[in-house]
């Protein structure tokens, strides 16, 4: 099983290459996405993962959309509901096409910088243009945590780690993997 690379790996500081047209709809691209999904599934705190974090220098990231949902309030004494099913969104050759003027300081961490957390200034709304695994273009706008994810993951594709712009840096013990 492929591991998530950590700060210090050269691939994390390089600008990722666009996914070539010949890979769209291919078994190779499907395998890359499946490997990324398995790696992200093991990370209980993880909501998204960029290809460079798997030592793959392509402009691609995935999001576990089900992990971005607000927690469900359960009445005292009631059984916990089952977790929502895994829902993975794929963004290939993404680019930010629009951002809000308003920015906010948000808490952030990264699977490639284990146990380090801090606050980063991010846009409150972001619109991304990307391609599907088959190569079809799409746009998606989002606010809140999804906007933060878009910026964080596209930073990865540009060789930027959140620690490059963090304030209030703290270190805590990393949660166990699944």
Image (cartoon, helix red, strand yellow):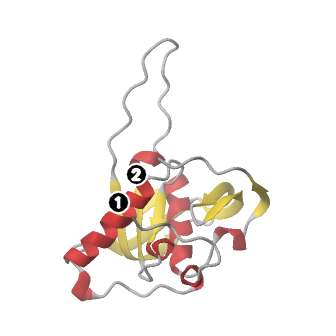
**Left or right: 66 as drawn, with respect to 12:** left
> Residue 65: which disc?
2
Farthest residue toward the top?
77
Crowd tier of the residue under label 1, counting other residues whose Cα lies within 10 Å: few below 14, some 14–19, many 20 or above: some
Q: Residue at x 38, y 35 (%)?
A: 83
In this figure, which residue is indicated by the disc labeled 1? Answer: 89
> Residue 165: which disc?
none
Q: Are marks 2 and 1 in contact (CB under 8 Å)?
A: yes
**Left or right: 107 as drawn, with respect to 52:** right
User: Is 43 in front, or is 69?
Assistant: 43
Distance of label 2 from label 1 (alpha carbons): 7 Å
Q: Residue at x 63, y 58 (%)?
A: 109
Q: Secondary structure at mark 1?
A: strand
**Left or right: 76 as drawn, with respect to 171:** left
Q: Image quadrant of residue 114?
A: bottom right
46, above or below 1, in the image: above
Farthest residue toward the front?
1
Observer able to see residue 102: no
Q: Position of residue 123 (x, y in %)?
A: 60, 64
User: Is 127 in front, or is 12?
Assistant: 12
Q: Position of residue 108 (x, y in %)?
A: 64, 57
23, above or below 83, in the image: below
Observer able to see residue 168: yes
Q: Residue at x 73, y 51 (%)?
A: 172
Q: Position of residue 43 (x, y in %)?
A: 49, 53
- Among the two numbered marks 2 and 1 on one chain, the one whose residue lies closer to the N terminus: 2
Q: Secondary structure at mark 2?
A: helix
Q: Position of residue 19 (x, y in %)?
A: 34, 84
């Amino acid at each position: 099983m492929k591991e998530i690379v950590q700060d210090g790996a050269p691939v994390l500081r390089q600008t990722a290459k666009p996914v070539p047209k010949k890979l769209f709809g291919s078994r190779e691209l499907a395998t890359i996405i499946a490997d990324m999904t398995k790696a992200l599934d093991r990370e209980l705190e993880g909501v998204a993962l960029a290809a460079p974090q798997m030592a793959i220098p392509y402009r691609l990231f995935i999001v576990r959309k089900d992990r971005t949902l607000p927690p469900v309030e359960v009445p005292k004494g009631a059984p916990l509901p089952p977790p929502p099913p895994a829902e993975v969104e794929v963004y290939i050759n993404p680019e930010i096409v629009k951002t809000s003027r308003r920015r906010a300081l948000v808490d952030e961490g990264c699977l490639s910088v284990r146990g380090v957390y801090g606050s980063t200034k991010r846009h409150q709304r972001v619109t991304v243009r990307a391609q599907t695994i088959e190569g079809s273009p799409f746009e998606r706008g989002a606010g809140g945590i999804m906007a933060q994810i878009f910026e964080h993951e596209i930073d990865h594709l540009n060789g930027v780690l959140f620690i490059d712009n963090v304030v209030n840096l703290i270190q805590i013990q990393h949660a166990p993997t699944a």
